[in-house]
Image: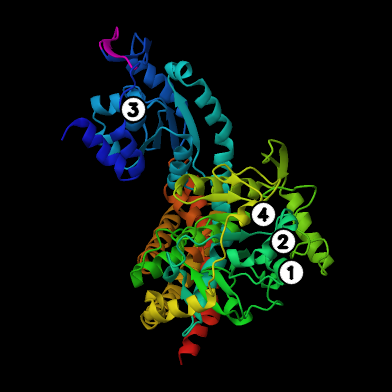
Amino acid sequence: MNIFEKNLGYVEKYNSSFCAKLKNHNFSDSANFQLVNAASGDTNLVYNGIPLHCNNNPQQEALTEFQKAGKAKIVIIIGLDLGYLLKRAFIGSSCKIVMYEPDLDILRFTLETVDFEQEFQSGRVFITNSLNELNDILSAIYNYKDAINVLRLKSADQLYPEQIKNLLTELPRIDADLKANFDTLFNKSWLWLINSLYKFIPDKPDFSLNILENKFKDKAALIVSAGPSLDKNIEIIKNNREKFIIFCANVAYKKLALNDITPDFIVYIDAGDYLYTIKNLDHSKTNIINHISSFRKVFEELNPNKFFTFYCKNDIFSRWVSKFTNFSIENYEAKGSVSHLALLSAYNMGCNPIILTGQDLAYTNGKYYSSGSFWADDNEDKELLQNKIESIKKAGVFEVKGQNGETLSTSPDYAGFIKYFEEFAREKQAVKLINCSTDGAQINGFENKNLQDVSDGIEPLNLNINKVLDNIVKTEKDLVKENYENIHNQLEIFAEDLKKALVITNKGFQCSKQFHQELQKRQINSVKIKKLVNQTLILFNELENNLFKKWNFSMYIAFKELTDFYAVMDDDSGQGDFAVIKDLSGCSYNLFKLLDKRLKYILNHVLLKNTQSNG
């Protein structure tokens, strides 16, 4: 195996498509490479007349630049060159390193020339040549509070001024998104978990969405959202109803119902109790696609034709169910947007084309939502509506490009959703994607068209969707449903482990409380403190081995507190031992205290419900 094949073998493990691109790349006719000796004797690479390293001492140049990394946990290096800076950063720190080399010629040449086995084998070095992939890598490797720094040699400023400008412009937004993802996890992971556990009752009236894969191949799908542009298209939807499989965001259902349009699927994702957006409407002729972590009482308060549950790969409880029942959720990934969930559901069912309407993702003509939708100006609950508008204003305003090239105002969330839709379009190029959300935000990868023109080109489906669904649920194997009994047996074991964990947690709380009190004394008893530190760590290790490692999803019981605890344990900031001990005291106290409360809640209000139902 040559150097190039060996290097690519490691790249393929985390990015197979990029690996294939490198394999298939042929050098440009204009690409000219020369290997020359620098004054120090080190090899320098000259590319099209530009020395990529210092002509005097490439090693010293790399060391000088690396010293700018500071205490960054993630270092982005612009320009691979011959890898001097990469290797310096690798041996000089334990940080994760992302190589961003925009030029495929240089990438291929260097990967054919320099052996990076040690660096790639470590699992903390990644390589890409696009800003979009760089974003994806950062999303995968970022940990709570990771500082990100950018390094580059002088040659990169000559070769990639535009790419550097774009990266430095985008990086603050990327960093903010990464931090926001953790904030979302901290705020909602507990709610997601209890929702998922609560809904796993015996004989729950749902089916896995997976059984609908490719069942509506090449049927036109219409994703209906509640943006202002829906007002312009509602009559067109009504007049062409039989041409589409309609996926409706929950907040848009009221608008359709008022116009006597029954969607085939209503999509519901909210973890909090937002069932009031749809529960007073008739669902008997439609079907609900329900995210596994959506509000726990969805089965009790809604009565649709059928429930289909969306298990997704970025949900920790879904991964446990998937692994235990041996069904794949690789093609199912929620992005926090109900419309994106509808889009992915339609895609996985085989729909083509997929058409958006009401997906403005911007405040068009001064309106937030279409008239007649749940959040419209005529909402009877004025206080609820006002609170919603205030929360939108409080989130701040972003500017995005409109379909006509104009600048539109939008929310930070909507700006993020635009990125998710564009990412979807890049990845799913085999399906025709059309955006009929007239005058809304520009979504690259979707063709902007008038809904009437699109409808005119589509033939009626001549399909009774509910009859098709009846047949599918009778004939398809639903691995989750078939394993209900086994899953409940596992949850009973989980309940027993929670009871044992509660005993440990109580001891941990008392220990950490005493630990905290000792640190408040004027005269610190170092022997006693050391003993309390050891007791705290022993108790935590018991919890870790018998609960968190055994049941991965249990980390969501106290995800923020666990993250804080691990951050202290991994601290390498150089602060003194006493400061670390003080931090350990605070985070262990918070962790054990919260665990005591939440373990009791799960046992008494969630798993007890399942046990009683079983009985």
Which label belongs to residue 234?
2
**Label 1 crowd (10 A; few <14 / some 14-19 / many >=20):** some
Which residue does the numbered mark 1 point to in the structure image? 259
Which residue does the numbered mark 3 point to in the structure image? 107
Q: CA distance from mark 2 to mark 3?
A: 51 Å
Asked if the residues shown at circle 1 and circle 2 are in contact, with their CB atoms under 8 angstroms apart, the answer is: yes
Where is residue 266, by image quadrant?
bottom right
For badge 2, the amino acid type reads: Ile
Which residue does the numbered mark 4 point to in the structure image? 452
Does residue 395 sit above or below 276 in this rendering? Answer: above
**Label 4 crowd (10 A; few <14 / some 14-19 / many >=20):** some
Badge 3 element: helix
Q: Nearer the viewer, residue 489 or 233?
A: 233
For badge 3, the amino acid type reads: Leu
Which tag is nearer the camera, tag 2 or tag 3? 2
| Residue 573 in sight here | no
Q: Nearer the viewer, residue 188 or 207?
A: 207
Which label belongs to residue 377?
none
In percent of width and height, residue 267 lies at: 59, 66
Residue farthest left in this picture = 1
Badge 2 element: helix
For badge 4, the amino acid type reads: Gln
Q: CA distance from mark 1 to mark 4?
A: 17 Å
